[in-house]
Image (tube, coloured by chain):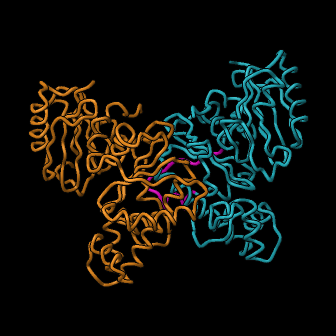
Chain colours: A orange, B cyan
Amino acid sequence: MERLVGVDIGGTRTRVAAVQRGQILARRAFPTGGMAELQKAVEEVVREAGWSKPEAIGVGAPAPMDMRQGVILHAPNLPHWNGVNVVKELGALFGCLVFLGNDATCAAIGELVYGWKSKDFLYVTWSTGIGGGIVAGGEVVWGTTGQAGEIGHIPLRPDGPRCRCGKRGCLEAFAGGLGLSDRAWEGLGERLSALELVKRAQQGDPGPARLVDEACQAMGQALAIVAELLEPELIVFGGGLTHSWGFLEPKVETALREMSRVKPRLELTRLGDDVGLLGAAALPFHFPKF
Amino acid sequence: MERLVGVDIGGTRTRVAAVQRGQILARRAFPTGGMAELQKAVEEVVREAGWSKPEAIGVGAPAPMDMRQGVILHAPNLPHWNGVNVVKELGALFGCLVFLGNDATCAAIGELVYGWKSKDFLYVTWSTGIGGGIVAGGEVVWGTTGQAGEIGHIPLRPDGPRCRCGKRGCLEAFAGGLGLSDRAWEGLGERLSALELVKRAQQGDPGPARLVDEACQAMGQALAIVAELLEPELIVFGGGLTHSWGFLEPKVETALREMSRVKPRLELTRLGDDVGLLGAAALPFHFPKF
């Protein structure tokens, strides 16, 4: 299989690419819509790549899903995709194999196949939410039904602030973009985006600085937990909040080193915004045997 | 390879068995000594099994180690084994392949091959200390150098009590046997073993009951973290503290279910005290490719 299409469905934008031997031959990006918009984009990249049809399509999405059936389940942030059987519908449209997986795990696959190529690493998407994908011994860790890697929802403080997932004190409640905004509203009485908050912290504003320090402390603790559990060589970061990596990384690294005897390297993804897209295209080769 | 010897070196006792197709043909158990005592026991079980020599020996030990070289590193609780190249020395004595691995990971291998046979589970040794071994997608998770699985040393409270590993607020500091004794001394002013403490908690003594509740809460939090990260089907327990499983399990389970969206089953090992021994015998088939 060489003529692959990768699809990265995001909360705001969807990316589609025709990928051959790790090269993106054609790409589209557009505001996330439904199946009609996706079909059009896939047709376009396939045509532009000079193929009659793709051999396989891999789709990554930020939503709970039934990977066996290929169905996106309740996805409040992806209203057009609620309950859609992506595998069946895209398969019927393009007459090829289709695979559906979690977007952060797809990003980990991208990093495994085309990026850092480590055999033991954690991939972290640090953005509005916090997602994760795990590779151990060169194999993707999927879990029993493909839901593994949820570092954003590990409980750090059982008595901590309410997370959007319904539980308390998850990493995401402290360090995710929306969580940081919630903490700013509660603690500072201001409506701030995570990026504004980080900018104010960098300028030395003490309230925002304290919240950003707490977020980095929580991230470092989460990474220390993963380091003790999985002894990874590497932790790879992507996502919007890494635009402030130079400011955040030293704080995260200090916390990690204090709390773990295992010292993985922290790196940014080598694939930039394409990490999830390239990983989705490689999903057919790393799909679990349930 | 069929004629296997398993060795389980413990802090107090060492077990040795000749194992063929999962059956223990002969066994020895004796106070942990050094290489001379081990050599004698291996010779005895090999003779009793009717073999001229074993085809492979697998050794599990509760110590930091260099798995590539087969050397047990600093092991304060195993003074005879400090710096011993187990693989080289046993290999020279018996003229066969020898493999050295972490004891809790060996127990996970035992459970994978001969016990519950789940493809996605965590094995937890709940005893004086707390050890762990992870199986994901049917493969043992070793980490970069074989040190993965250290659930006892995941940092739950960065400002918590000092752990014997030097860090603060590890699971083991709250819920390990020695940790519980330390908490009893600090909090109740009494020198109590973990088993005495649990017994007093069962009798309704409020001080011990509070400490045992805290331990179970910490264990539940640790399992919830693993559940979100790895989506295991099962969490399997062994070790001395599981003798009070009927009292402890409901507390751990309640905490786990509150803090995780993934709900793995909690089970006791199906192999009793032999889990590590059988797993060590199967170590040759699951040794990592570093």
Q: Which residues lie in the magenta part? A: B253-268
Q: Is B131 in front, or is A254?
A: A254
> x and y percent of residue A150 in the render?
41, 53
> x and y percent of residue A265 in the render?
49, 53
Q: Could you tell me which residue is drawn at 69 percent across and 21 percent down?
A: B21
Image height of B88 relative to A80, above or below: above
Q: Is residue B265 magenta?
A: yes
> x and y percent of residue B8 in the render?
77, 38
Name the outermost residue toward the front: A246
The picture quadrant where one finds residue B271 is top right
Image height of B12 relative to B119, above or below: below
Judge from the rendering whether residue B159 lies leftward or rightward of residue A114; answer left or right: right
Is residue A24 visible to us here? yes
The picture quadrant where one finds residue B44 is top right
Image height of B161 relative to B195, above or below: below
Q: Quadrant of the N terminus of chain B?
A: top right
The picture quadrant where one finds residue A183 is bottom left
Q: Could you tell me which residue is drawn at 16 percent across and 29 percent down?
A: A92
Is residue A187 visible to us here? no
Q: Could you tell me which residue is drawn at 58 percent across and 48 percent down?
A: B266
> x and y percent of residue B34 in the render?
87, 40
Q: Could you tell me which residue is drawn at 13 percent across and 36 percent down?
A: A45
Q: Is B61 in front, or is A21?
A: A21
Judge from the rendering whether residue A23 lies leftward or rightward of residue A217; answer left or right: left
* Picture mark count: 0
Q: Quadrant of the C terminus of chain B?
A: top right
Q: Is residue B264 magenta?
A: yes
